Image (cartoon, rainbow, N blue to C red):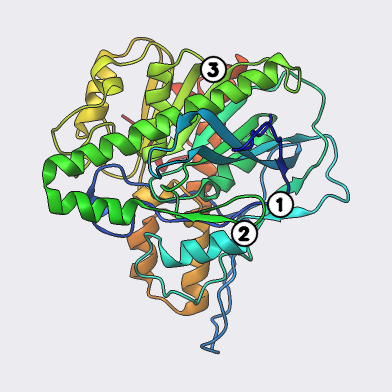
Amino acid sequence: METNDTDGDTKTNLTSRRRVLAASALGLAWAASGVPGARATAMAADDTAPTPRVSHASRMARMKLPAPSGPYGVGTVSLRLVDRRRADPWVAGRRRELMVDVRYPARSVASRPRVPQMTQGEAAGFDRVNNFGALPKGRIDWSATQTFAHLGAPLDPRGPRPVVLYSPGVGDPRTLGTTLTDELASHGFVVVAIDHTYDASAVEFPGGRVETTLLPQEFERAQKEGPAAVVALMQKTCAVRAADTRFVLDEVERAFATGRLERAPIGMFGQSAGGFAALQTMHDDGRITAAANLDGVLAYVSEDHDEGELSSVARDGVDGPFLLMGMDGDDRTNVPSWRALWEHSDGWHRDLVLRGAQHATYTDATSLIPQIARQLGLPKETVTGLVGTVPAARAIAAQRAYVTAFFDRWLRGRAGGHFLDGPSSNYPEVRFV
C-alpha cells in the first residue's frame, strides 16, 4: 500500500506507530449517543497472575497484552494515506488524511523490534480523552504497552492472504483492537486497522504531528441545538467512517493491482461504531465479502434498545455472511436495529452473546483494565463496570475463536465442522441466539 502526501505525490511509509487503548463512546454524554466505541478483548493466561499493588503513589501502571496464538509471527507497518479527492469533513481546507496499521504473517521476526501499542503523542491524547472515567489521569503509562507485532518483518510469501479491515469504536484509536488484529495476522490474514482522524482520541502522523478528537465539542454543540442535531452528528460520524473505509478499500485494490498483495477476498470487523461501519460498508460496497459486528448498534438512537431511525444497512439487510456478537443483554430480540438487519438479510448469519460481557469487553480493555486496577488498587466494581464479569482470559479466547473461525469460513472456505452452527462445550460463555 502507498501513502499520498497532501501537497504532491510524495509517498511515505511510516515506521513505528502504535498505541494502547482509547475511549469508547466519548467519555462525555456521547456515550449515550448510540454509536458507542468501547474497548474489549485481550489478556493471555500468563497475564491472569496477580500483579503486586503499587504502594508508591507516583508510580505509573504498566500493562501487557496477550501473545497471539497462531503459527505465524506478526509483522507490521504503519501508513499515512491521503485521499486527495475528498475534503476533510471535520476541518476545513484539508484533504482527508488517515493513519492505518497493516498487520501480516511474517516469514521471520528475528532482529525486528516489537512495536508499542501507542506513541507518546497518542498516549497523551488518550489520557486526556477516553471513556474510562473511573481511571485516574496521569497514573497510567499508556505508551509502555508492547504489541506482538514486529516492525518491518518480511511478509510470508505463501498466499494468497485474505485481507481483513478493522474499525474501532467512536473516540477509540485503531490500536484498541490490537489483541484481535495481532491474532488474525498470526493465523495468516493481512489486517488493516483504520484510525478515523478527528474521531479517534489522538492520531499521530509522520513527523510527530498529533491530531486530536473533535467529537466532544461537536457533541456539546449538537446538544445545545437539540435532538435533531445530535442525530445529524451521529449520521455524519458514521458516514465519515464508511467513506474512510471505502477509501482504504481503494488502497487495498491498488495493492492487488500492483502485485504488492496477491488478490484475495476481503472481510471487515469492528467494535461498536466500527462494527456498524463494517456492516454498512458491506451494504454499500461489494468488495466486502463478510463482516463481523462486535456490539455495534445499527441505528441513530441514544440507547441500543431504543426504537428509532435505522441505518440503511438495517433497513435493507445484506446478502453476504455476517456475525453479530453482543454484550450480555444485547441480541436481535431486544436491539431493534439488529432485528431489522436479521429480518431483511439473506444468506448465512449468526447472533452470539458473550455472557457477563460489557460493551468494552470487545476491545483490549478486557486485559488492560484488570491490570490497571490491581496496580492502582482500584475497586472490583471499576473492573466489572467497564469490562463485565466474564474472566478476561475466557472473553479473549471466545472472541479469538469465533472471529477467526468466521473469517476462515467465509474468506478461506474452511468450514471448520459445525463450530459456527451451535453452542460449543469449549466456550460455555457464548450463547447462540
Instruction: In the rendered view, tell whether residue 396 sits above or below residue 59.
Output: above
Q: Secondary structure at mark 3?
A: helix
- Which quadrant of the view contains residue 9? top right
Describe residue 419's horizontal placement relative to residue 251 as left or right.
left
* Label ID, residue 410: 3
* Label ID, residue 314: none
Nearer the viewer's eye, disc 3 or disc 1?
Answer: 1
Nearer the viewer's eye, disc 3 or disc 2?
Answer: 2
The image shows residue 39 at horizontal and vertical percentages of 43, 51
Q: Where does label 2 land, which residue?
A: 119
* Residue 170 is at least partly visible in this image: yes
Q: Identify the mark nearer the N-term, 3 or 1.
A: 1
Q: Amino acid at mark 2?
A: Thr
The image shows residue 70 at horizontal and vertical percentages of 70, 38
Q: Mark 2 to mark 1: distance in Å?
A: 8 Å
User: How many numbered marks appear?
Assistant: 3
Q: Identify the mark nearer the N-term, 3 or 2.
A: 2
Residue at left 55%, top 28%? 248
Q: Where does label 1 land, which residue?
A: 16
Residue at left 14%, top 32%? 308
Q: Mark 3 to mark 2: distance in Å?
A: 34 Å
